[in-house]
Amino acid sequence: MKNSWRLLLGCVAVLLTMLHGSAVQERRVVRISAERFSFTPSRIELAVGEQVDLVVTSDDTAHGMRIEGTDVDLTIPKRGPGEIRATVSFDKAGRYEFACSRMCGAGHNYMRGEIIVRESADPR
């Protein structure tokens, strides 16, 4: 009976260690720069269900960033040390456009990008 308890406690310890390790795993961070009517990068590839932290900065004036199909609508502060963060995840494969949501000048309508969500992490 003692050996059964030891085996059970050992299994529980291994399981807890595995769960803790996966919970501590860091999300991928994608840094995006907004400047003069463009986002860099303007194309981001993700896998379905992958959680990604977007860190967005501006190299000139204040901009916005709205991602279709989500509730993400950020206001990006003017150039300098300020940044804005959002965590995104998509449960369906597809193409999701993002665009500047704050009038920023004559080329505002060209300030766009896309998030490509694939069934797996393999982009083939």
Image (spheres, grey):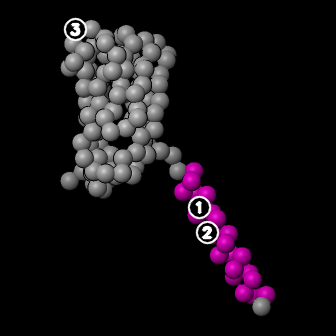
Which stretch did the figure color magenta? 2-24
Cα separation, mark 2 vs mark 3, equals 57 Å
Label 3 amino acid? Ala
Q: Position of residue 32 (x, y in %)?
A: 36, 27
6 falls in the magenta region? yes
Q: Is residue 40 magenta?
A: no
Residue 15, numbered label: 2
User: How many other residues sit within 10 Å of disc 3, few (<14), some (14-19) or many (≥20)?
Assistant: few
Q: Observer-nearest residue: 111 or 44?
A: 111
Which disc number belongs to residue 106? Answer: 3
Picture quadrant of residue 120:
bottom left
Our reading of the magenta stretch's main secondary structure is: helix
Q: What secondary structure is found at the residue carrying circle 2?
A: helix
* Position of residue 35 measured from the top left corner of the image (x, y, whole percent): 31, 16
Q: Which residue is mark 1?
A: 19
Task: Answer whether residue 97 is visible to the viewer in this image.
Answer: yes
Circle 1/circle 2 CB separation < 8 Å: yes
First-in-chain label (2 vs 3): 2
